[in-house]
Image (cartoon, rainbow, N blue to C red):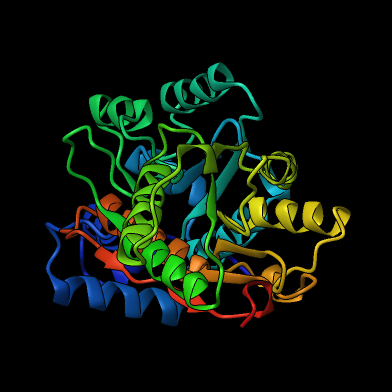
Amino acid sequence: MKKVTIRQIAEHLNLSIAAVSRALDGYSDISVETRQRVLEAAQEMGYVPNRAARQLRRQKTDAIGYILPAGTPGFSEAFFSEFLVGLGDETPRHRLDLLISTAGSSLEREKELYRDWVRSQKVDGFILNRIRLSDWRVRYLHENQIPFVAMENSLDGIDYPYVEVDNTGGVAALVEHIHRQGFRRLAFIGGPHDLKIQVARLAGYRQGLAHCGLGFDPDLVVESELSAAGGYQEARRLRWLPNPPDALICMNDEIAFGALHAMHDLSLDVGREVAVAGFDGVSASAHTRPPLTTLDIPIHQIAQTLVQALAFRLANKPVQQICLALTPRLLLRASTGA
């Protein structure tokens, strides 16, 4: 069967080739009525667009990029697995491709990837997460006029669409729950000090302690790698203190998985002798031994929302701030005595 061309659609509708081409590409200078006529005719005639030619005409790749931040466990971390599934499920709905890479442990490698993708125009825009308080990615993409959206908002004073989670309120509620279960010496295993979520979740820990009438002990706050291995190491170190904690509040579920492992190796009864809790609500948290109490956020839905917002930006449609404070849901399970 001979392939239908834009010229044939134009002749069929008595329109110029340029008008048909711009209608198919979604340009705003074509009226809604004309665009609808063109789309209906294209479907009836069996028109299949030449994607490469379309990209060349529009000087766009029809692709968005996501680079796993440096210093993360990468694809093995449950959070990123669920986040990537959300991105992958949503991009085809907007006729976009998704380009993914990982920076490993090297911050310089991460910067190289962003520079390479921007200079070579590999993608039309980016999705960011694990935002730092002052984030070079936000500044770099803004300075180069590259569209982007993010999970969390940096303190750089740059406006962009983002999803914000109420990290502080969520952790405060978690602390109060653990205190009600009879635990009195609560520790916090956090992450790198420059991460937005670290600052917000640590603030929630301190707020929760204050609400419960518990004093803040700096010896009970430690910084971990955002990994199960980091959680394991820091949890054991905390339990070796002369006056060890009886509860471990972890900045994310990945750290909590390591903390659970450490408590088992120390022959402690999790949920009775010591409490362990996480944050993110990844699906694996329901299947630990015992099941992990955690603050659940809709990771898959957040990723989809970010893709939708970026697709709007790429189409030059107005995008408002997505969400000011998405409230996490406290999942009470046996790891905190629930």
Location of the C terminus by quadrant is bottom right
- Camera-side residue: 329 or 24? 329
Q: Does the image show residue 46?
A: no
Location of the N terminus by quadrant is bottom right
Residue 37 vs 213, above or below: the answer is below
Question: Residue at (51%, 43%) from the top-left corner?
Answer: 66
Q: Determine the residue located farthest toward the front in the rendered image.
A: 242
The image position of residue 236, as x and y in percent, is 74, 43
Question: Residue at (67%, 40%) from the top-left corner?
Answer: 242
Residue 278 vs 154, above or below: the answer is below
The image position of residue 75, as x and y in percent, is 69, 47
Question: Residue at (25%, 78%) from the top-left corner?
Answer: 37
The image position of residue 161, as x and y in percent, is 25, 52
Left or right: 267 as drawn, with respect to 136: right
Query: Which quarter of the figure has residue 136?
Result: top left
Residue 176 vs 53, above or below: the answer is below
- Camera-side residue: 293 or 41? 293
Query: Which quarter of the figure has residue 326?
Result: bottom left
The image position of residue 232, as x and y in percent, is 75, 45
Left or right: 261 as drawn, with respect to 298: right
The total number of labels drawn is 0
- Camera-side residue: 5 or 149? 149
Query: Which quarter of the figure has residue 21?
Result: bottom left
Question: Residue at (28%, 46%) from the top-left corner?
Answer: 153
Residue 219 vs 271, above or below: the answer is above
Q: Does the image show residue 114?
A: yes
- Camera-side residue: 321 or 26? 321
